[in-house]
């Protein structure tokens, strides 16, 4: 361990910093108007003629820093109700690529424009709004990448002209959170994306950005002259919904129906404080989770959150800025609440939030040294309190407390603090510490598996008080060309999260990584090549070495979007007391376009694989192949199909198949059909869904879920096992 640490520090010391000055940022001076703008995709109204014009966009992806091939002009105005944004995207009309789709679902090669807004100049939340020439809305949280889980109310209209296309936005101030008063410190940037005839995708920006710098807000322009209106309490939004469904279980010859009303209330206490209440919420997901192969998996599976209630304010409750080091709040632990409450707000650079929910059907994740399991626990009450302070262009620190009390006995509390500091933009220090107390129920029905025992405790629910701690740090330095990082984390044997997602405990883990990017100039077909190495050392709390791993990665990115990845990994591992030496596996993957309308993803992998589900684990040889094809049938229809085949010699083999078809009649009305097949269980899952969504919070859904079972192979003697029909209606008042 000492030798690894010495090598890591030595290599880090030879890392050189390379970063240009980004302190000088453009300024947009906005004007206030007395009359409202008609949102019609036409910028000929007199008010627009007096607005400052933002132009002179530069490329930020294909040819970084070079002037954009096509001219773009952006204008801003505001009144007491809305912020108005008008784009003029100059381009030959025949070169415009666009499509109809549901919101937040653009095709990869669609032209689009967008605006980012940081209303506190602190990186806590950057709003993103965008649209393609067909008026398909996109919104979410921006940073490096777009998190589309946040839905906002705004209006957009577009028009195609003989010189390009126009996009006109009206963003209500009621959709935003901000402080009030004069001398606002708002940040802004404008974006545009287009694909040229050579299939090179360009993303151009007004305020130039530098790849490899994590501080997104400090690279944005300043928005001056705005004095937003004070939002008075009482502007309440009511979103009632109604779910009616019918289900049949053909195996048990039974059926049931349900009729569930619910109510979602959004009460803006102020311009920065928001109270949300969900009464008898329908937290079932409209879109099902993807099937995962869990045959050789000894840990609980992670599924991403898709429920709208948790979207607003989600960035606040992420621990360690969602850097993956520890997860103390996983919203899907709140499974089926009868009532849920959320309050979020801000004072200066300090944000705070509270979530409280009574869950009728709780799921509890229990981590152990080599495995984890999820068990049902009946009714519970969850409370989460979070506070976070943003540092000026330099990171953040915060604290979180989560508690869950079970009606059948027992409670859990977890408390943690996190800190992230990045002075100079490319040096990063991240720290976290947490402690947990689990007062178990004294009910042996909650025994997740045979009582193997750990530390001084038993696994059975026999009334013990189990305590544990977690700590971790990460020190990294990176820019456009180089990266170096050292990460360590510790989880004691008794550490558990009350509402989080931690798969394993009793571990001491350290990782060192070193990478380099090479950028090619003179408009080479190759944009970038990346190389990296990674060293991992892992042991348990008794000092037994559990894993040592070395990984080499190589990535090549081409201007036309093609991407080739290669990775090879060799490791030694101790699992269930069996020592495995020199396991080596590798993979290669490819992403690219066959033609302008067809995209392909494919890869192969193979090597040694520990067979974990056996009582005495063994080393097997894995071979896997995966791939899927996306095809744009027309501007309104898309189709994709993919498969993942896995063969572990002498142990198991099979494949997963997924197909997906969508047709958009308008940008509000769409039909999606999803099909999944698991060869491991011989089951088909078919899920057509018709959606009408006039805005982010008003929608009508009609769907069917069918589960079919095959006898021997995928098409032999198909029998229907389960069927569910449902209608969901919700409307924003």
Image (cartoon, grey):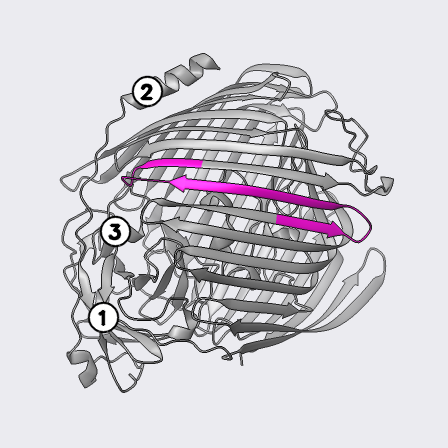
Which residue is at a point 17% across and 48% down the rendered structure image? 65
Q: Magenta part of the protein: which range? A: 402-430
For disc 3, the neighbor class at 10 Å (few under 14, some 14 to 19, many from 20) is many
Residue 407 spot, x, y in % from top left: 80, 54
How many marks are shown on the rendered structure?
Answer: 3
| Residue for point 36% across, 32% down | 476
Checking the image for residue 11, the label placed there is 2
Query: Which image quarter: residue 194?
Result: bottom left
Q: How far apart are marks 3 and 2 (CA)?
A: 29 Å
Q: Can residue 289 be seen in this view?
A: no
Q: Does the magenta stretch include residue 418?
A: yes
Question: Which mark sits nearer the N-terminus, 3 or 1?
Answer: 3
From the viewer's perspective, tell me whether residue 527 is left or right of residue 278: left
Residue under label 3: 219
Residue 126 lies left or right of residue 671; in this view the side is: left
Q: Does the magenta stretch include residue 620?
A: no
In terms of secondary structure, where does tag 2 sit?
A: helix
- Towards the viewer: 399 or 337: 399
Residues under numbered marks 3 and 1 in contact, where contact means CB atoms less than 8 Å apart: no
Residue 535 versus residue 207 in the image, above or below: above
As drawn, 144 above or below 604? below
């Amino acid at each position: 361990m000492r030798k690894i640490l010495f090598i890591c520090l030595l290599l880090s010391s030879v890392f050189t910093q390379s970063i240009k000055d980004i302190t000088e940022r453009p300024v947009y001076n906005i004007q206030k108007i007395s009359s409202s703008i008609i949102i019609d995709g036409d910028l000929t109204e007199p008010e627009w003629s007096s607005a400052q014009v933002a132009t002179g966009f530069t490329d930020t992806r294909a040819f970084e820093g070079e002037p954009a091939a096509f001219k773009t002009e952006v204008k801003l105005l505001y009144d007491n109700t809305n912020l108005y944004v008008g784009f003029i995207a100059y381009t030959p009309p025949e070169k415009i690529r666009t499509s109809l789709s549901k919101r937040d679902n653009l095709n990869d090669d669609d032209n689009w424009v967008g605006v980012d807004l940081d209303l506190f100049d602190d990186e806590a939340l950057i709003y993103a709004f965008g649209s393609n020439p067909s008026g398909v809305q996109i919104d979410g949280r921006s940073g490096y990448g777009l998190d589309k889980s946040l839905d906002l109310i705004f209006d957009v209209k577009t028009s195609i002209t003989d010189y390009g296309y126009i996009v006109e936005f009206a963003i209500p101030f009621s959709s935003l959170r901000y402080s009030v008063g004069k001398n606002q410190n708002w940040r802004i940037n404008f974006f545009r994306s287009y694909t040229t005839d050579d299939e090179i995708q360009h993303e151009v920006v007004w305020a130039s950005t530098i790849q490899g710098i994590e501080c997104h807000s400090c690279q944005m322009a300043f928005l001056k002259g705005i004095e937003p209106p004070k939002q008075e309490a009482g502007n309440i939004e009511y979103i009632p919904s109604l779910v009616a469904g019918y289900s049949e279980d053909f195996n048990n010859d039974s059926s049931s129906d349900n009729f569930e009303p619910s109510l979602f209330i959004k009460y803006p206490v102020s311009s920065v404080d928001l109270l949300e209440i969900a009464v008898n919420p329908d937290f079932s997901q409209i879109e099902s989770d993807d099937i995962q192969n869990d045959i050789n998996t000894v840990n609980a599976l992670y599924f991403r959150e898709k429920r709208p209630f948790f979207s607003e304010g989600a960035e606040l409750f992420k621990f360690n800025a969602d850097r993956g080091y520890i997860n103390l709040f996983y919203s899907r632990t709140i499974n089926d609440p009868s009532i849920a409450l959320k309050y979020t707000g801000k004072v200066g650079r300090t944000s705070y939030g509270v979530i409280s929910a009574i869950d009728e059907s709780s799921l509890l994740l229990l981590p152990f040294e080599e495995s984890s399991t999820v068990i049902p626990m009946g009714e519970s009450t969850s409370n989460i309190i979070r506070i976070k302070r943003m540092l000026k262009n330099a990171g953040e620190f915060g604290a979180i407390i989560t508690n869950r009390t079970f009606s059948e006995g027992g409670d859990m509390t977890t408390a943690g603090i996190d800190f992230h500091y990045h002075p100079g933009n490319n040096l990063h220090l991240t720290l976290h510490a947490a402690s947990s107390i689990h007062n178990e129920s004294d009910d042996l029905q909650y025994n997740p598996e045979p009582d193997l025992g750990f530390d001084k405790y038993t696994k059975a629910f026999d009334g013990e008080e189990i305590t544990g701690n977690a700590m971790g740090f990460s020190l990294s330095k990176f820019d456009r060309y180089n990266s170096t990082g050292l990460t360590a984390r510790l989880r004691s044997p008794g550490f558990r999260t009350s509402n989080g997602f931690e798969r394993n405990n009793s571990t001491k883990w350290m990782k060192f990584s070193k990478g380099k990017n090479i950028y090619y100039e003179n408009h080479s077909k190759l944009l970038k090549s990346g190389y990296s190495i990674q060293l991992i050392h892992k042991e348990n709390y008794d000092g037994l070495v559990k894993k040592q791993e070395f990984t080499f990665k190589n990535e090549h990115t081409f201007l036309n979007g093609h991407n080739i990845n290669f990775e090879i990994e060799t490791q030694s591992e101790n699992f269930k007391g069996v020592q495995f030496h020199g396991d080596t596996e590798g993979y290669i993957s490819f992403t690219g376009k066959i033609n302008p309308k067809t995209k392909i993803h494919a890869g192969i992998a193979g090597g040694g694989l520990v067979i974990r589900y056996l009582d005495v684990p063994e080393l097997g040889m894995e071979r896997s192949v995966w791939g899927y094809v996306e095809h744009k049938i027309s501007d309104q229809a898309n189709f994709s199909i993919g498969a993942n085949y896995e063969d572990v010699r002498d142990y198991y083999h099979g494949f997963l198949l997924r197909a997906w078809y969508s047709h958009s009649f308008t940008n509000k009305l769409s039909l999606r059909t999803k099909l999944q097949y698991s060869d491991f269980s011989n089951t088909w899952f078919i899920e057509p869904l018709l959606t009408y969504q006039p805005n982010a919070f008003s929608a009508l859904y009609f769907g069917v879920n069918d589960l079919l079972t095959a006898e021997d192979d995928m098409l032999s003697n198909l029998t229907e096992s389960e069927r569910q029909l449902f209608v969901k209606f919700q409307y924003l008042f």
